[in-house]
Amino acid sequence: MLRRLYNWTMSLAGQRNAEGVLFGVSFAESSFFPIPPDVLMIPMVIARPAQWFRIALICTLGSILGAIAGYLIGMFLFEQVAQPILSFYGKQDSFDKVAGWYNSWGGWGVLFAAITPFPYKVLTIFSGATGLNFGIFLLVSIIGRSFRFFLIAWLLSRYGAPIRDFIEKYLGLLFTLFVILLAGGFYLVKFVF
């Protein structure tokens, strides 16, 4: 099943609407969707290494606009929308306890989440709900997301063939590692914040 999913993702990467899907997934992941856009971006760059910059730009723009949406969800729709999302991730009780500290140091948290597998959408919503300075939020989101997606895309464009061979050879192991990293990010959200 994993091999079929991998082959399907690789075939999607070459389709005409792949960039639109990438933008949509990037947008959604920054505000509410649990699956990171790397799942689609990586095979797209491997399939079209000459377009790495364009693919990274689409992913970054979608992610930043999604982060703004997450911030606005937190700011204007906290009780109706954000509170259930934060509850889903187990963060509703932590909100008041962390809000004061977060407004002093939250920019670093957003930067960390923007670069790592940590669930970014939790901090985009949290930033809006706590009233983190929007300029700081936007700046660290742009820096973090640009760094992450452009670095990954550039590395894949430069070393794509060996990386693709490695991925295809160790697909099961890499998928397990990805799930562990993703679960670890959610664990951090649940028990750290």
Image (spheres, rainbow, N blue to C red):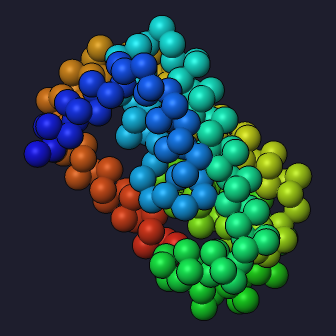
Q: Is residue 119 above or below residue 17?
A: below
Residue 72, position in %: x, y?
76, 63
Camera sees residue 78: yes
Residue 94, position in %: x, y?
63, 87
Residue in the image at 66% along x and 80% along y: 80
| Residue 161 sits in quarter | top left
| Residue 54 sits in quarter | top right
- The total of numbered circles placed on residues is 0
The answer to whether 67 appears left or right of 155 in the picture is right
Camera sees residue 108: no
Residue in the image at 14% along x and 29% along y: 169
Q: Nearer the viewer, residue 4 or 103?
A: 4
Residue 102, position in %: x, y?
76, 73
Q: Is residue 11 above or below residue 186?
A: above
Residue 111, position in %: x, y?
68, 52
Quadrant, the N terminus: top left
Q: Is residue 44 above or below residue 8?
A: above
The answer to whether 115 appears left or right of 74 in the picture is left
Quadrant, the C terminus: bottom right
Residue in the image at 20% along x and 30% along y: 7
Q: Is residue 193 above or below residue 33?
A: below
| Residue 26 sits in quarter | top right
Residue in the image at 76% along x and 81% along y: 99
